[in-house]
Amino acid sequence: MTIKKGRDYVIGIDFGSDSVRALVVDAADGEPLGTAVSAYRRWAKGMYCDPKANRFRQHPLDYVESLEECVVAALSNAGAGAASRVRGITVDTTGSTPCLADEAGSPLALRPEFSDDPDAMFMLWKDHTSVRQAERINAVARTWGGEDYTKYIGGVYSSEWFWAKALHLVESGAKAARAAATVIEHCDWMPALLTGVTRASDIRRGRCAMGHKAMWHPSWGGYPSAAFFDRLDPRLSELAASLGTETYTAEEAAGGLCPEWAERLGLSTDVVVGVGAFDAHIGSVGGDIAPGTLVKIMGTSTCDIMIGPEPPAGAPERLVAGICGQVDGSVVRGTIGYEAGQSAFGDCFAWLRHILAWPARAGLLGADVDPGAFEERILPALEAEAAAIDPARSGVVALDWLNGRRTPDADQGLTGAIAGLSLGTDAPSLYRALIEAAAFGSRAIVERMRSEGLPVDRVVGIGGVARKSPLVMQITADVLGMDIAVSSSDQSCALGGAMFAACVAGLYPSALDAQASMRAPIERTYSPEPGRRAVYDALYAKYKALGAFAEKEMRK
Amino acid sequence: MTIKKGRDYVIGIDFGSDSVRALVVDAADGEPLGTAVSAYRRWAKGMYCDPKANRFRQHPLDYVESLEECVVAALSNAGAGAASRVRGITVDTTGSTPCLADEAGSPLALRPEFSDDPDAMFMLWKDHTSVRQAERINAVARTWGGEDYTKYIGGVYSSEWFWAKALHLVESGAKAARAAATVIEHCDWMPALLTGVTRASDIRRGRCAMGHKAMWHPSWGGYPSAAFFDRLDPRLSELAASLGTETYTAEEAAGGLCPEWAERLGLSTDVVVGVGAFDAHIGSVGGDIAPGTLVKIMGTSTCDIMIGPEPPAGAPERLVAGICGQVDGSVVRGTIGYEAGQSAFGDCFAWLRHILAWPARAGLLGADVDPGAFEERILPALEAEAAAIDPARSGVVALDWLNGRRTPDADQGLTGAIAGLSLGTDAPSLYRALIEAAAFGSRAIVERMRSEGLPVDRVVGIGGVARKSPLVMQITADVLGMDIAVSSSDQSCALGGAMFAACVAGLYPSALDAQASMRAPIERTYSPEPGRRAVYDALYAKYKALGAFAEKEMRK
């Protein structure tokens, strides 16, 4: 199938934690034509959040306003006539980021009576108010006597996920929880909004979000049973029933652009809107995913995405132990999508930056030094010195579990550590040890995937850290003993969204076909330095020993 | 015995790492009358040192010039007529700080041909050029088939000590090593100089230095045998033979002040000069030592001094396992002096300060911030915030072996660690964990002394940290579960020297009698906070577990 250049455009829309980006590309070859970013206004002011209580809520109007703003601007940047060539739109978002909604499938905070109620807003992925509810879900899953509904999500339900958050609102007696008709994930609401859904039951729930975060699986006919949810709270049962039993992959259409949004965006109602999915999964397609390729989305944390073959017809699905989740079609149709990740990656380095910036925040530098600008200078300076340190000689070994461990074997109660310290250990040595620790965390995931029968032949890095820190990427390549390719696109998620949009618009038969034509070139490949292998093997053994100690002795 | 106030003065002279202090006191009650400090001039310029190679040498002229300067100034400060009332002088020094010397007992660097040769100068205690030689001494001691000469020094000969340093000079083929007639410890040379010794064989070697650092012990008739030294190097045998077989306690006189030095200092030749000893041992007497009292000299590292009863006549001396050394009379006559210590105490905190000051040194603060002044502000600010942290909630546990472990069970190959880290761990939490780690290191020593049959009923803290950091002292008291008394004197070593000087001048029958009259009052006592015991017991268990991990996995 050949698509004529300059004829068909598609839009990928990537909702991040702080802002949303729209990217208009040519569906023929993925050439970027126009892009724009819009920051969430209420969120930027810190509204509805309480960081000390780990409460992070986002108002649906932030999404609505920023969506319109960035799409209109991106189309404008793409030049005259661009809007008339747009054929498809696909949205990806963070997740799990759910919200209580009404019978129309509309977030409750859009109603006047709930417009200032944080419990009627989206609960951002990093909202950790639901720790106790996750513990209850895990306890019930292990003891209720029926199906183990956690078997496809690595055996542990997280406090960051859909049902834990819904249960938290129910249990806390929130007024919104009593008024709600359903719960909706951010990536499912945006397509519902754009396609003009007016009944909650018409929402097309995405396979990716529901499979990875809401325990949806065909083997038990959809979501966990009412009997299971009743054990947690009968109200949760009612909300669960509202979701139906079907889910849809991102290669399927949610519908056509509704007249209201066609007008707001200046587009035709012929534009097809795809089913939504999470940023990491959509981004992995933008980042060259293929069977055997691990795509690492490297930011404050990492999401590590793989795809693998479906089991032969009639054969049971092979479970990969200790990985976040595995869902047939969560990335692309006809393959199992596997999700793993590291709870702290860039955050390990940000932690050291935060330590080193303490004197500035404590006012020890005097009024002439701007703490923010000062803090920005720290990591580049550390990187320059850390690059010169010989890993065979520093002796410092760190553990990257500063925010618990996502995979392998999720355990939020774990903590980080730094060992091998001497009076001569300086800040660049600590920085290098933290980089090595993050790389060792990556290696532990790769080793687990391999030992569970998932071959990892190639690694692609996307995201902020992949493009900003050559030292981090080189050390990760050295530690993995593998080439790591970095895409030339600094917007792999939005590009992936555009690929899916081209697919749902019927321009390509599948997302991987769209990827083949629209992919961004690899900008740089980091190859392992010969001679570093033995050094890092020895340090990795120490990392594992330090981890075993921390697992046994240093739980929160 | 009553001494009339205002009649008899004594001088304690305390040679530190950077400077020497003279203190003139009234022998009747220890009242300080005049004091002065003189910094070593060549040392202050960094001459003869190579910190990267851990080479720290001090020119004997630094000692000579600073000695004269501070004594003259202290006497001047003590007022008219003070000099004529001086009866005794005692010197303490750092150690082991040995130097190659000629037939006259004079350091070789005082000869023109060696005046710029670092190998002909004193090797400061922290000079670590002799690591391999210490390993050889330990290997020979364990395998040569004769007496285990390390049995009274905890089983491990240190690279910081007398014979390791002498052997290093011999093995390296230093010209000075070929020219030398003997080796002299700093604390033995100062009395030899002041008493006008002109033959090496006339030097009165101190029991303290030779017993703790040169393997002198009466049970084998003095120093190790020629057969033992021959195994190391025949040249070392020759140097060892020059030391004779006798040693003298600091309660014995080295001799009378010689005419030359009487004139230089403006004193009478009737002044008695005591045998010298190490600062910690002399300082412990200035710091209220008594049987059952542990005196901790708390600075960058600690020296922990105890005294205990001699064994009954004919009974063998009880060995305290894992302590630096035990020497009959090394502190005061008629008791066994025990020395232990922590390789890094204040240095643990200085390490964190150094980490936090890295951006300043790296030039990230701009020209307006003076790095030195900035660094000085860090610890006081950290202390204020760390004091407010609840130790039951921080979760951070550190290991104080940043400079190896001195006691219990000396092991310079060990390293420090920090565990229990999360993204919320801030600089004050790290600081508090390091303080707690230093306190846990103190507890490990106290527990070892008790388990080896040495009762510890009371703790006295002297030195810079004891007087400067109430938080460190409070946490140490909490962790030990014991009161810690802090002396009002900020010059306990020089005061201890004055007590010994009063003893050798015949004003008191013993140093402890001098102490009873001349002691400085206790300024403050830190008592354990009720309710902290269980918390610190639990954290101490984690400290021990972290230590066991580091011993097994994280050796240098």
Image (cartoon, coloured by chain):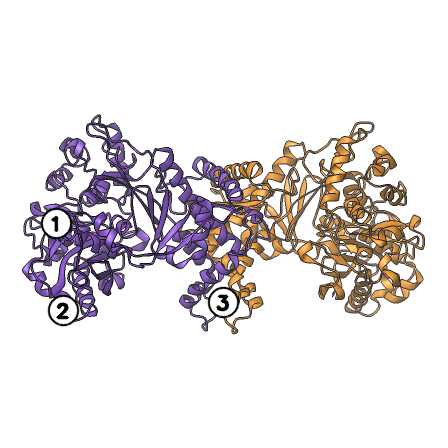
Chain colours: A purple, B orange
Mark on residue B364? 3
Q: In this view, does B318 lie above or below A460?
A: above
Q: Within the image, what quadrant is residue B14 found in?
A: bottom right
Residues at marks 1 and 2 touching, judged by CB atoms closer than 8 Å: no
Q: Circle 2 sits on which residue?
A: A81
In this rendering, position of residue B378 left or right of residue A105: right
Where residue A240 sits: x, y (%)?
Answer: 14, 39
* Identity, as a three-letter code, of the amino acid under mark 1: Ala
- Few, some or many residues within 10 Å of mark 2 (<14, 14–19, 20+): few
- The disc at residue A253 is 1
Q: Earlier in the sequence, mark 1 or mark 2?
A: 2
Identity of the residue drawn at 7% across and 59% down: A269
A517 or A415: nearer the viewer: A517
Quarter of the figure that contains the C terminus of chain A: top left
Query: What chain does badge 1 belong to?
Result: A
Mark 3 crowd level (few <14, some 14–19, many ≥20, 10 Å Cα): some
| Disc 3 element | loop
Distance between mark 1 and mark 2 Cα atoms: 24 Å
Place residue A210 in its image quadrant.
Answer: top left
Q: Distance between the residues labelled 1 and 3?
A: 52 Å
Tell which of B172 and B269 is nearer to you: B172
Instruction: Please give the chain letter of the residue carrying mark 3.
Output: B
The answer to whether residue B495 is left or right of residue A165 is right
Nearer the observer: mark 1 or 3; the answer is 1
Asked if badges 3 and 2 are on one and the same chain, I answer: no
Q: Can residue B385 be seen in this view?
A: yes
Residue A431: x and y, percent? Answer: 48, 54
Residue A301 percent across, percent down from the top left: 35, 50
